[in-house]
Amino acid sequence: MKKPKWVVEKEQARKAAASETVWLFGLHAVRDALMNPKRQKLRLIVTRNARDKLTEAIAIAGIDAEMADPRKFTAPIDPASVHQGAALEVKPLDWGGLAENCIGQETPRVLLLDRVTDPHNVGAILRSAEVLGASAVIGTRHHSAPETGALAKTASGALERQPYLRVRNLADAIVELQEMGFFVLGLDGEAEQTIEAALEGKRDLPVALVLGAEGPGLRQKTKETVDQLVKIDAAGGFGSLNVSNAAAISLYTSLNG
């Protein structure tokens, strides 16, 4: 009996996900991935100079390094990438689900990204999230930046330590967080209330902040699902802020007011 088309497509997607790998590059990103016991490491290509700088991390990872001529770096990455003589093929990290990542801290903070596709922006957001103590950064499986070498390099190691979840449906994830007790705020430059005002007397609650792509902002469905729309209290308009800067400011504000 012939399998239905949707079954075949689901099986193909599962096989594709199982075979998916990522090439990380740059000394910081490669070092932190090598030292991450949760990261499945497949292939390491380094120049002699990079190998010398990564000696400890390579030993900890227990991986054999393939040597490359710095003038003919053979890793399958963009030739324009600033690889610093190091590239590592890995499997994407599996952080698990929302509940196991988003609850447990004293004052949990979560960032959700609505169609933020630029890997440099997401990398910078992961870096800020780690520094400021966010429980997780959540994007979608489609229309958000996947793990890439560019994202990892911008994150400067944070990709290995900061949970970055990608869910099927952002609105469903918001509802799930609300059911966990999260107060969910959507960042919108046209909102009437500031983050500070919305969190007055509520700073001890778990808080999730949803940020949209620069330009279009939050989707209508997202706006309808969050508990409240808020803006950053600033002299200029929210639209003038880069989304990674907005994420850092809103996260800090939600914690410190």
Image: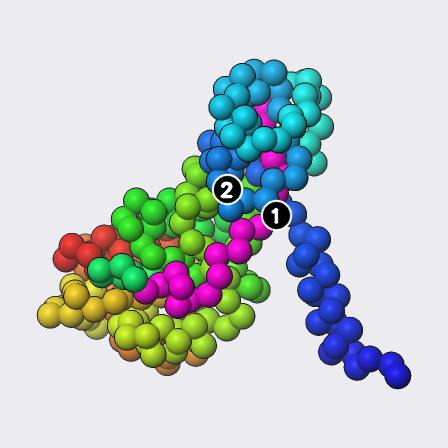
Q: Secondary structure at mark 2?
A: loop
Looking at the image, residue 70 sits to the left or right of residue 5; the answer is left
Determine the residue positioned at 65% across, 27% down: 64
Looking at the image, residue 213 sits to the left or right of residue 5; the answer is left
Let me know if residue 173 is in the magenta part: no
Determine the residue positioned at 48% across, 35% down: 35
Front residue of 171 and 216: 171
Q: Amino acid at mark 2?
A: Pro
Single out the residue that lies furthest toward the right. Answer: 1
Q: In the rendered image, which quarter contains the N terminus?
A: bottom right
Q: Secondary structure at mark 1?
A: loop
Q: Is residue 185 above or below residue 175?
A: above
Q: CA distance from mark 1 to mark 2?
A: 12 Å
Q: Quadrant of residue 131?
A: top left
Determine the residue positioned at 46% across, 45% down: 159
Q: Residues within 10 Å of mark 1 (few under 14, many from 20)?
A: some
- Name the N-terminal-most of marks 1 and 2: 2
Front residue of 29 and 236: 29
Q: Quadrant of residue 135?
A: bottom left
Query: Residue 91 has which mark?
Result: 1
Looking at the image, residue 56 sits to the left or right of residue 205; the answer is right
Residue range corresponding to the magenta coloring: 82-103
Q: Amino acid at mark 1?
A: Lys
Of tags 1 and 2, which is closer to the observer?
2
Residue that carries the numbered disc 2 in the rendered image: 37
Task: Report x, y in % for residue 158.
Answer: 41, 43
Q: Residues within 10 Å of mark 2 (few under 14, many from 20)?
A: few
Looking at the image, residue 208 sits to the left or right of residue 165; the answer is left
Determine the residue positioned at 59% across, 44% down: 40
